[in-house]
Image (spheres, rainbow, N blue to C red):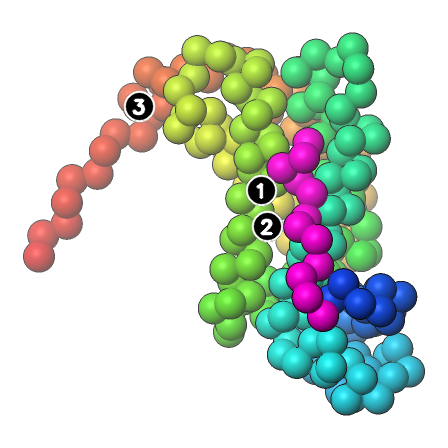
Amino acid sequence: MTQMLAPARPGIYARGTETVDAILKAAQEVLIDEGADAFTIRRIAARCGMKVGHVSYHFPRKDMLIQVLLDELVDGYGTLIDGVVNRPGLTAEERLERVITLCLEDIGSKRTTHLFTELWALANHNAFVADRIRAFHERIHGVIGGYVAAINPTLSHKDAGTVALFISATMEGATLFLGHGKPWAGQMPAFTALAVRSLVSLARTATSADIALLAPAREPEPA
């Protein structure tokens, strides 16, 4: 799972680790508890009890802070997956079952529901944030794609990626309906059971021929 791990913090981020960790923790808390509108260097500084200039020294711009924040999230998920999913003796299907369960349980937490909802809100108005979130999800999709390819080696690389994207989108889309505090949050256990059964079955039985038949190439639109 080395592809899940975030790169080392560059330059200034490598210094004052405890300070940087406190800033990142405060940034997460602001997003989770107060929302994207409150996500300012000034508000983050107040949250962690630092001067604005001290926070700005480590993160002169919000987009730099978001970049490191997302890298830290990838690192955290990588460690979690290594501990829960990548255990010796598990089959690829068992690993996929575990990663689906793990992701959906995580989506049901207040932290993840609020954090990603607010990050998406920021991404709607900031191209850099949108690109960083895209890169974050691509790394997650890549991990799932590896499991799909191992379960179903007859799929082409592209089609294994398409199946992985469908699995990821199914899980991530649940956030708005079954995440913490959402209308159907109480049905997350049943949704998780159905998702594990259906998505693992899809990974096992999908064929490149079926995908091509179901998704024919679009004709070019008239000029």
Which image quadrant for residue 210? top left
Of circles 3 and 2, the one toward us is 2
Residue to which mark 3 is pinned: 212
Residue 175 vertical position relative to residue 97 in the rendered view, above or below: below
Q: Choose top left, top right, bottom left or bottom right for residue 62.
A: bottom right
In the picture as drawn, the residue positioned furthest to the left comes out as 223
* In the rendered image, the vertical position of residue 162 relative to residue 42, given as above or below: above
Q: What residue lies at 65% left-to-right and 29% top-to-bottom?
A: 195
Answer above or below: position of 59 versus 194: below
- Graded by Cα atoms within 10 Å as few (under 14), some (14 to 19) or many (20 or more), the crowding at tag 1 reads some
- Report the side of 54 relative to 167 (left or right): right
* Closest to the observer, 148 or 199: 148
Helix, strand or loop at mark 2: helix
Q: Nearer the viewer, mark 3 or mark 1?
A: 1
Q: Quadrant of the N terminus?
A: top right
Camera sees residue 83? yes
Q: Nearer the viewer, residue 14 or 194?
A: 14
Which image quadrant: the C terminus?
bottom left
Q: Amino acid at mark 1?
A: Arg
50, 17: nearer the viewer: 17
Q: Which residue is mark 1?
A: 139
In percent of the image, x 47 and y 68: which residue is there? 127
Q: Which residue is mark 2?
A: 136
User: What is the three-letter code of the residue carrying label 2?
Assistant: Phe
Look at the numbered discs 2 and 1 and tell me whether their residues touch, using CB distance below 8 Å: yes
Residue 46 visible? The answer is no
Q: Measured from the top left, where is residue 77 in percent x and y?
A: 74, 43
Q: Is residue 42 magenta?
A: no
Span shown in magenta: 1-12
Kind of residue indicated by mark 3: Ala
